[in-house]
Structure formats: structure tokens, C-alpha cells
Image (cartoon, rainbow, N blue to C red):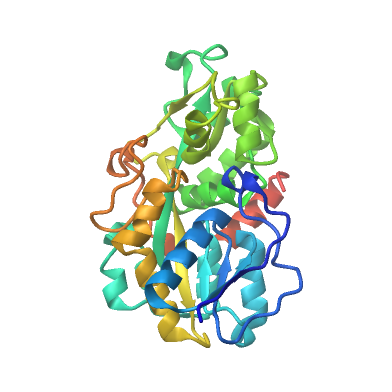
Amino acid sequence: MRRRTLITTALTSSVLALSACGGAGESYSPDPDALQIYSSQHDNLTQAWAEGFEEQSGIATQIRPGEDASMGHMIVEEGAESPADVFLTENSPAMTLVEQNDLLAPVDDSTLELVPKDRRPSSGNWTSVAARSTVLVYNPDEIAESELPESLMDLQKPEYQGMWGAGATQADFQAIVAGMLADQGEEKTAAWLEGLQENAEIYKHNVATMNAVNAGEVPMGVIYHYYWYRDQAETQEGSGNTKLHYFRNGDPGAFVSLSAAGVLKNAEHPKKAQEFLAYILSDEGQKVLETSGSKEYSVAKGATSDPDLPTLESLEAPAIDPVDLDSEKVTQMMTDAGIL
């Protein structure tokens, strides 16, 4: 008998607009017969993938939701005793943390081959399953297109004081900083963070940042693309007064964050876990991203994304091996800069 259980918390329909939340620190009773999926990906996506996998394979799943950083640290603390078979993340630094603690098994070669090399880590210990792009959302009533910064790095300049906002305390933004650190080095990133502390308004998350730009509180904001595209496709209440600016040209502001999937080294169901990753990257699994309204990018070879989006290739993202994204270092640097 197939079975799927979602351990719910305060998740509502707003999960499309917000990161998956809760669950990591709550009581949890794993079903020993079900594939255990620890997920900090959006709830609707994780559920759709689990349901599709169950229908195709007949393998039961159980989902434990959480947030990137807290769930990554929880798996590290659980170590070899973790009930998790699979770990799904929104951003890859949380997966890298688990990898650095030697808790991941290599992903099957046949699964890795489904993803272009520049969209997965060189280690082969996990793979991307989706992607999201860094963008600058701006309000044309507050700043002219000709006045927009040429680079994300320019936002540290004095002329941009009070001109932009960001959800700097969130994992999404910290992944962007991790990309900057890998691409630009510690000295330039530290200087940029000092500029952020001086120039930016700090909002709770990407949606709050976009809403503030839309309301004219600040002229610009650094967010991920899909929040804007979702709002545009729905009510436009949070984005109707705004446009998007893409930095491109390998700029740190063109950073593409990879959502990750990995199999735990001590998984109780390793073969089923590998099958689940292969399903997510199959034509059917990647079609979920195109048709679910998530507005996230598909990553597998030949897969297409939502037609509203510019192509992933056109973003001209900086070439960064995701194994080089250091979330712990970023947290320390942001703390030193007085942001966290």
C-alpha cells in the first residue's frame, strides 16, 4: 500500500510566496517503511515530486519540512543516526554543509548525467534539481533605468545610500553573498557587506523587499526572480509598480542559486533514495517546475522552464563551482559587519 505523510506546521497557501518553514525543531516520528525526505524546498514542490514518485514507483514517502540552515545543521547533529534518506534544499550552501561533514553518498552516475556539468557540483555528492536567479527589482517612479547600477558590487557606493533593500537575514540572500565570496574573494565581499550595512534597508525576506520597492519605500531591492514572476502572474499587488533588472555578464548580481538534492550516506533506503533523485530529474519531475507555477528554473538537459522566464542560458551567470559556497564563512562575515 502506498502511503505519503506530510508533517505539517504553520504552512498555508502562502508557501508559494515564502520559503518553507518550521518542522525542523519539532517532534517527528519517522515511518520506518517510508522513504524519509528532509526538505527545505517549497512545500508545494516537494509534495508534487513525492506524489509523482509514489505514483510511478509505488514507494511510500514521508516529508519533514524545514529551513535550509536549520535543517542542514540538524542533519549534521543527527549524524549517522539521522532518519533522513534524502535531503532537498532551496539553496546549495546547506547541502554543502552536510557534504563537508561527510554525510552524503555519491549520486548515481546515470542521474548526474541528466544535469549539465555547470549546474552541479564537481564532487558528485549531490545534484541540482532547480534554480533561481538573482535580480534587481526597481520602481521606475523612484529611479530611472539609466541610473541603475551596472554591477551588484556598485550598491556599496555612497550614491546608493538608502536606495535599496534586501532580506539580508534569510538563506536566499546569504546564498547570493556566498556566490560573491566565491567569485570576488573575501576582501571585496567584506567591503560590499560594509556598504550594505551603510546603504541598505533590511527587510524580513524577498517578498517584503519587493513589496517595499513596489510601495516606493526604497527604489531598488535585491531578490530572487521567481517572487516577482509569481506576483505578476497573479494579483500584481506586490510588483505592479516595478520592473526587473538583470546584471548578466558574469556579474555577482547574475548569480544563479541551485536547489540541491542528496542521498544520506547512512540512509535506511539508499536505493529508493537514488531512485527519487532520478525521478526529480526525469522529464516528468522537471515538468513539475515548468507547470506548477513555481516559476523556478528546470535544470536537467533538454528540460524547459516556464515560458514567462528568460532562458537560464541568457542570464550569463558567473561560473562558480557550488562546492565552493561557504555558508559558515558568510554567516561570520555578515555578523562581523553588524548585519546579523
* Front one among 34 and 182: 34
Residue at left 27%, top 75%?
A: 110
The furthest residue to the left? 302
Horizontal and vertical percent position of residue 262:
46, 72
User: Vertical placement of 169 versus 264: above or below?
Assistant: above
206 left or right, relative to 298: right
Residue at left 29%, top 60%?
A: 283
User: Vertical placement of 71 versus 334: above or below?
Assistant: below
Horizontal and vertical percent position of residue 50:
48, 67
Horizontal and vertical percent position of residue 90:
52, 56
User: Vertical placement of 70 versus 78: above or below?
Assistant: above
Residue at left 31%, top 72%?
A: 111
286 left or right, relative to 84: left
* Front one among 334 and 267: 267
* Front one among 244 and 54: 54
Residue at left 57%, top 59%?
A: 327
Horizontal and vertical percent position of residue 131:
42, 51
Give the quadrant of residue 160: top right
Give the quadrant of residue 255: top left
Q: How many marks?
A: 0
Judge whether residue 301 can be spotted in this image: yes
Judge whether residue 100 can be spotted in this image: no
